[in-house]
Amino acid sequence: MFERLAPDYDRLNELLTFGLVRSWRRALLAASRLRRGSRALDVCTGTGRSLAAIERAVGPEGLAVGVDFTPGMLARASGRRVLGDALRLPMRDGVFDAAVCAFALRDVADQTRMLEEMRRVTRPGGRMAILEIGVPEREPFRMGFDLWFRGVVPRVAALVGQAESHRFLVRSLEYLPAPEALRGTLEGLGLVEVGRRDLTFGTARVFWGTVGGG
């Protein structure tokens, strides 16, 4: 499915979020506390939009690596890319200052395992940050989100031949952990300074934490 989605992925993201996805990615980078010279991993990098932003943040003296298991998505990314599984990251322990993931937590077979792997490859004192779609907790934002996400999004996607993938996107909300549950999982992994920020009335959320021991 993601192979078929790859050619339209970025333009649909821009269209269906009214361009807000760019500001959401900036919030992800802010949460990761990246600076020039940092070493960062983008898990489930897809077409590499977050990876490109990470590269700019860490500069030529830093290191930005993206990992994904869909060749068609990865081929559209630039920079350092690795074909690999988020549940078995092909990296050594503690080699990154930060590990981030955008819009993929609800798509993996084992969410806790992916988070454990992100923690494993992040050094003590380093950061983990996760960006995900969010369901607003307050009305009328929740009603508006449901009307758009469940009603309009699949129809717009169908116009470019991507109806199947976006029906899956709607179903994937069932696998999205509640905000406090995800925060609890991060704390259970030994992260400290765990936090959360709602974006655009809660239609997206960024979570972060610091790997203990630093």
Image (cartoon, rainbow, N blue to C red):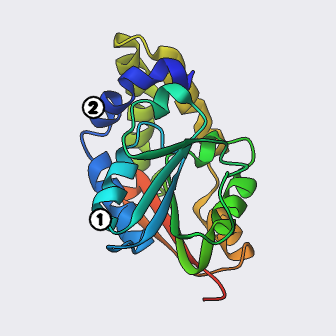
Residue drawn at (27%, 55%) of the image: 23
In this view, the residue farthest toward the bottom is 214
Q: Is residue 200 visible?
A: no
Residue drawn at (28%, 59%) of the image: 56
The residue pinned by badge 2 equals: 15
Tell me the crowding category of disc 1: few under 14, some 14 to 19, or many 20 or more residues within 10 angstroms, Cα based: some
- Image coordinates for residue 91, horizontal then vertical, percent: 65, 57
- Image coordinates for residue 51, horizontal then vertical, percent: 39, 51
Q: Nearer the viewer, residue 78 or 11?
A: 78
Residue drawn at (35%, 35%) of the image: 13
Compared with 196, 71 (above or below) is: above
Mark 2 or mark 1: whose residue is earlier in sequence: 2
- Image coordinates for residue 153, horizontal then vertical, percent: 40, 27
Dot 1: element: loop
Numbered badge on residue 59: 1
Compared with 141, 181 (above or below) is: below
Compared with 197, 41 (above or below) is: above
Number of numbered markers: 2
Q: Nearer the viewer, residue 208 or 83?
A: 83
